[in-house]
Image: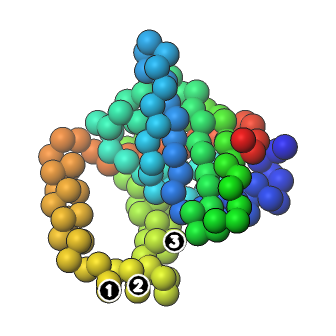
C-alpha cells in the first residue's frame, strides 16, 4: 500500500494522536505519543529538542509512526507509516506547525467545547510549556513516509 492511497490519507486525516517509534543507539525501541499534522505528504510531529523522541530521531532517522482512530471503536486497524525523520528547530516551520495544530485540535467546535470543559487544566499546560522552554527549544519531527501498512 502506498502513502498516497486514499484510505491511508483518510486514516491520517481522522486520527488525533500519532505514536512515533524511534530507536536508541543500542537498538532499543521507544514509542512516544504526540500531536501531529499531515503536511505536503509528510507527517509533522511537535515536541521539544531535549525529548527522547527528538534525540533518537536525530541520531537514527529511521522511524515508524502509528495511527489509530480513537473515536471509532468499530475500526481496530492501526496504520504504520515507516520513513525517514528530520528534526528541525526552524522558527518558520514551528509557526506553521503551531497554526495547523491550533486549527486541528482547538479552533473547531469539538476543540472549543473541550477547552471550555477543561479550562482549569490549561494552566498546568502553560506551566509545563514554560518549564520545557527552560530545558531547550521546541522542534518539529518531519517524517518523510516511505511505506504504509495496516497492522
Mark 1–mark 2 contact, CB under 8 Å? yes
* Residue located 27% across and 45% down the image: 137
Give the crowd class for mark 3: few <14, some 14-19, many >=20 residues within 10 Å. some
Q: Is residue 90 visible?
A: no
Q: Quick check: 104 left or right of 149?
A: left
* Residue located 46% across and 20% down the image: 28
Give the crowd class for mark 1: few <14, some 14-19, many >=20 residues within 10 Å. few
* Residue located 72% across and 41% down the image: 151
Label 1: element kind: helix
Q: Is residue 132 above or below residue 86?
A: below
Say which mark, if any, is on residue 104.
3
Per the image, the residue denoted by label 2 is: 112
Label 3: element kind: helix
Residue 73 location (% of width, % of height) = 64, 65
Per the image, the residue denoted by label 1 is: 116
Residue 18 location (% of width, % of height) = 53, 51
Q: CA distance from mark 1 to mark 2?
A: 6 Å
Identify the mark nearer the N-term, 2 or 3.
Answer: 3
Mark 1–mark 3 contact, CB under 8 Å? no
Amino acid at each position: 500500500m502506498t502513502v498516497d492511497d486514499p484510505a491511508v490519507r483518510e486514516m491520517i486525516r481522522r486520527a488525533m494522536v500519532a505514536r512515533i517509534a524511534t530507536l536508541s543507539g543500542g537498538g532499543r525501541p521507544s514509542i512516544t505519543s504526540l500531536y501531529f499534522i499531515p503536511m505536503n505528504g509528510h507527517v509533522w510531529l511537535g515536541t521539544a529538542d531535549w525529548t527522547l523522541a527528538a534525540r533518537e530521531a536525530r541520531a537514527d532517522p529511521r522511524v515508524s509512526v502509528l495511527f489509530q482512530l480513537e473515536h471509532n471503536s468499530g475500526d481496530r486497524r492501526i496504520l504504520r507509516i515507516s520513513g525517514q525523520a528530520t528534526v528541525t528547530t526552524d522558527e518558520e516551520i514551528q509557526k506553521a506547525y503551531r497554526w495547523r495544530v491550533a486549527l486541528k485540535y482547538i479552533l473547531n467546535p469539538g476543540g472549543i467545547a473541550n477547552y471550555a470543559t477543561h479550562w482549569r487544566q490549561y494552566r498546568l499546560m502553560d506551566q509545563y510549556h514554560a518549564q520545557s522552554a527552560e530545558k531547550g527549544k521546541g522542534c518539529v519531527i518531519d517524517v518523510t513516509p516511505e511505506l504504509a501498512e495496516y497492522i
